[in-house]
Image (cartoon, rainbow, N blue to C red):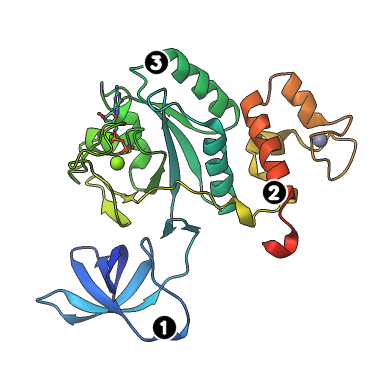
Amino acid sequence: MLKGTIIKGIGGFYYVKTEDSLYSCRARGKFRKDSLTPIVGDIAQIEVTDNEKKEGYVIDILPRKNELFRPQVSNIDLLLITFATQSPEPSLTLIDKLTVTAAARGVNCAICINKCDLNSEQAEKYANIYSSAGFQVLMVSAETGENVDALKDLLKGKTTALAGSSGVGKSSLLNAIGESFNLKTGGVSDKIHRGKHTTRHTELFPLSFGGFVFDTPGFGSFEIENISYRDLPSLFPEIKAHEGGCRFTGCSHIKEPDCSVKAALSEGKIPQSRYDSYTELYEELKKIKDWQR
Ligand SMILES: Nc1nc2c(ncn2[C@@H]2O[C@H](COP(=O)(O)OP(=O)(O)O)[C@@H](O)[C@H]2O)c(=O)[nH]1
Ligand SMILES: [Mg+2]
Ligand SMILES: [Zn+2]
């Protein structure tokens, strides 16, 4: 029996990368019965049926460390939330929804600000917001190569999912760190150009210096619908850090008096844009009844 990582699943076949080979495998019947489906990122145990052709069966998968559902991937060490200083203009609300999704799923996340060559002032502004919120922040440029070595260090030895809107430079960054996936890059407003690379399935690429990177059709939608508004404060690290001094237990940190979170906000210890995302999400989640989750 061999152990490997599922790097791709297409048409009923799972591609399993072991230490020194790649096997195409079908899943054993047990998966249908157990209503458990192998997904990209899973560590699989395989039985090799043909060593020449590199074929086999997925016999079992090891318990998942964590899992995201849109797209479905597992065992993520790092969600690298990537956006550009401009072109396209970032939506901080969407970025904050991603940090909340990651926190709710127990996935560690960091912030990567690309296209710093275009607007260093905006880069600094965003970096301040996210580092004071408690995240590791990288300011990079795939174009000039600025801090691309730091990005490489961050990815080394980890399984990373790059999340971010189309056009922010995810493929360019992977090309810039010298990995030969040959990911094509596409212009922002170049939608009809036939050569534009669109990822149609999820795939896990091994990094030459150790680690893996997911290339996925995009983490464009969010999984916040399963989160209770009561848990929201604990999913914002900077809000969690300033809770505890509020007058009311179960303080929502929105309308109550004597709130230590609002005090921290007015002292500039919590970024305004993060607090705005918090209140917006809180109201949104409060509308979802518990039985709807
Ligand atoms: N000025 C500048 N342009 C960049 C940078 N990174 C990527 N681009 C450009 O942005 C466009 C989209 O990049 P791409 O890597 O396809 O983005 P993806 O959709 O996130 O994979 C391409 O035209 C790239 O050449 C950067 O750091 N600076
Ligand atoms: Mg791309
Ligand atoms: Zn409070």
Q: Give percent across and percent down for residue 106.
A: 56, 52
Q: Give percent across and percent down for residue 1.
A: 28, 79
Using residue 65 as the reference point, say whether residue 15 is left or right of it.
left
Which comes before the other along the chain, label 2 or label 3? 3
Q: Nearer the viewer, mark 1 or mark 2?
A: 2
Along the viewing direction, whichever of 154 and 76 lies nearer the viewer: 76
Query: Within 10 angstroms of label 1, few (less than 14), some, or many (20 or more) residues?
Result: few
- Residue found 68% across the figure and 23% down from its top: 269
- Residue found 46% across the figure and 34% down from its top: 111
Secondary structure type for disc 2:
helix
Query: Within 10 angstroms of label 2, few (less than 14), some, or many (20 or more) residues?
Result: some
In this rendering, the answer to whether 217 lies above or below 246 is below
Secondary structure type for disc 3:
loop
- Residue found 25% across the figure and 47% down from its top: 207
Q: Amino acid at mark 1?
A: Arg
Residue position for label 3: 119
Using residue 224 as the reference point, say whether residue 202 is left or right of it.
left
- Residue found 64% across the figure and 34% down from its top: 277
Secondary structure type for disc 1:
helix
Q: Amino acid at mark 2?
A: Leu
* Label 3 CB-ligand 1 distance < 8 A: no
Residue position for label 2: 285
Residue position for label 1: 32
